[in-house]
Amino acid sequence: MKTIRQFLDHSHRSLYSVGPSATVREALEIMAQHNIGALLVLEGSALAGIFSERDYARKVTLKGKSSSDLKVSEIMTAKVISIDTRHTIDQCMQIMTDNHIRHLPIMNGQTVIGLISIGDVVREMIAYQKSMIDQLQSYITG
């Protein structure tokens, strides 16, 4: 199974973030502009939290708060589960499933170097399974 290092070597996506003092509306605008479901919340270069559509739905919309006045730091998920480049894709799937999360920041020490989503994990798992099936078919018919 592919490691996160191998995933990053083939993934050339930008990382999007906001500061903790950004408004929820500003964060939502960035997410909409880039068609993403979560933003890293960085204080300088340090990971302060993660802000997701789920945070917005559960902590703003359902509670009748205003996204224009509310700061990201007030509703972000501050206890962030992260991984490093030695984790494998299947380990990410297990972490996400066990913790009911959809995004995992990828860390190198205290520095964020990437972000993997459940969609990325599923695509990688499907590609791996297809490769294994192809190899087995080749072996059987070869």
Image (tube, grey):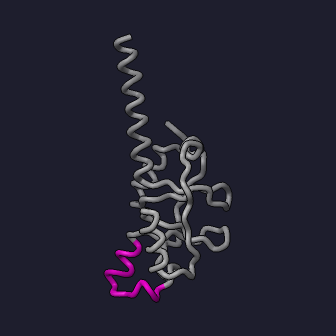
What residue lies at 41% left-to-right and 36% top-to-bottom? 127
User: Outermost residue toward the front?
Assistant: 33
Q: Which residues are magenta?
A: 55-70
What residue lies at 53% left-to-right and 72% top-to-bottom? 78
Give the camera-side residue of 100 and 127. 127
Residue 125 vs 48, above or below: the answer is above
How many labels were placed on the picture? 0
Q: Quadrant of residue 136?
A: top left
Residue 11 horizontal side relative to residue 59, left or right: right
User: Outermost residue toward the top?
Assistant: 142
What residue lies at 65% left-to-right and 68% top-to-bottom? 46
Residue 63 horizontal side relative to residue 35, left or right: left
Residue 27, position as x, y percentages in the image = 48, 74
Give the camera-side residue of 33 and 109. 33
Point out the image quarter for the C terminus.
top left
Give the camera-side residue of 84 and 72. 72
Residue 47, position as x, y percentages in the image = 61, 68
Residue 39 horizontal side relative to residue 67, left or right: right
Does 75 lie within the magenta span?
no
Does 64 lie within the magenta span?
yes
What residue lies at 57% left-to-right and 82% top-to-bottom? 21
Residue 6 vs 77, above or below: the answer is above
